[in-house]
């Protein structure tokens, strides 16, 4: 007897696989490392960090130095209200990406230079060079 293809052995598996592979169930989480692709070059006395931040404006990006860690955070929220238009579907995005790099506790924020151009954040971080210790003369008091 011939059976309709609906009743084949893999029907139930295929229905559930297709159903739960939909974007609705997967969510929209994205790995921040893939969105903040970073190249670090050794320039001898400093490091050049180039971080791609496509779609972000300069105002959306913040770099912070705390406890020897340089943290770059890019946050954005796209919310617009147009009461004049009738939408069938309207989506908003709100989120942030963040990456941290250890640069050393001797580096200060004045040592780091940063610029943002065409969706690329460029940071120049000096290497921490060990300063030779100067020997201090210590006198022994004689009584």
Image (tube, grey):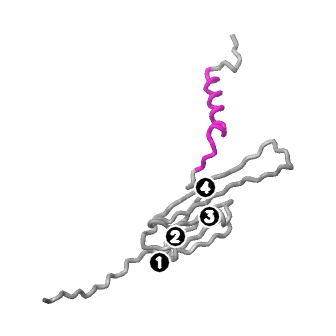
In what element is the residue under mark 3? strand
Relative placement, left or right, of 16 versus 103 is right
Residue labelled with disc 1: 45
Relative placement, left or right, of 31 versus 7 is left
Relative placement, left or right, of 50 versus 118 is left
Residue found at x 69% / y 20%: 6
Q: Which residues are magenta?
A: 9-30
Q: Nearer the viewer, residue 99 or 143?
A: 143
Q: Nearer the viewer, residue 68 or 29?
A: 68
Q: Are marks 4 and 2 in contact (CB under 8 Å)?
A: no
Residue labelled with disc 2: 41
Residue found at x 66% / y 18%: 7
Q: Are marks 3 and 1 in contact (CB under 8 Å)?
A: no
Q: CA distance from mark 3 to mark 1?
A: 26 Å
Of the numbered discs 2 and 3, the one sitting upstream in the chain is 2
Q: CA distance from mark 4 to mark 1?
A: 32 Å
Q: Are marks 3 and 4 in contact (CB under 8 Å)?
A: no
Quarter that holds the C terminus: bottom left
Q: CA distance from mark 2 to mark 1?
A: 11 Å
Of the numbered discs 4 and 1, the one sitting upstream in the chain is 1
In the displayed structure, 143 sits above or below 90; it is below
Residue 61 is marked as 3
In the displayed structure, 67 sits above or below 80; it is below
Residue 96 is marked as 4
């Amino acid at each position: 007897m011939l059976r309709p293809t609906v009743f084949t052995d893999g029907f139930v598996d295929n229905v559930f696989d297709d159903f739960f592979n939909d974007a609705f169930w997967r969510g929209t989480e994205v790995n921040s490392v893939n969105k903040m692709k970073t190249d670090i070059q050794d320039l001898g006395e400093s490091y050049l960090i180039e971080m791609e931040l496509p779609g972000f404006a300069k105002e959306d990006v913040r770099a912070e130095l705390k406890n020897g860690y340089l943290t770059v955070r890019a946050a954005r929220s796209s919310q617009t209200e147009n009461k004049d238009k009738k939408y069938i579907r309207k989506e908003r995005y709100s989120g942030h990406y963040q990456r941290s790099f250890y640069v050393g506790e001797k580096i200060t924020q004045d040592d780091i230079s940063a610029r943002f151009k065409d969706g690329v954040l460029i940071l120049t971080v000096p290497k921490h060079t060990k300063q030779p210790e100067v020997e201090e003369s210590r006198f022994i008091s004689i009584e």
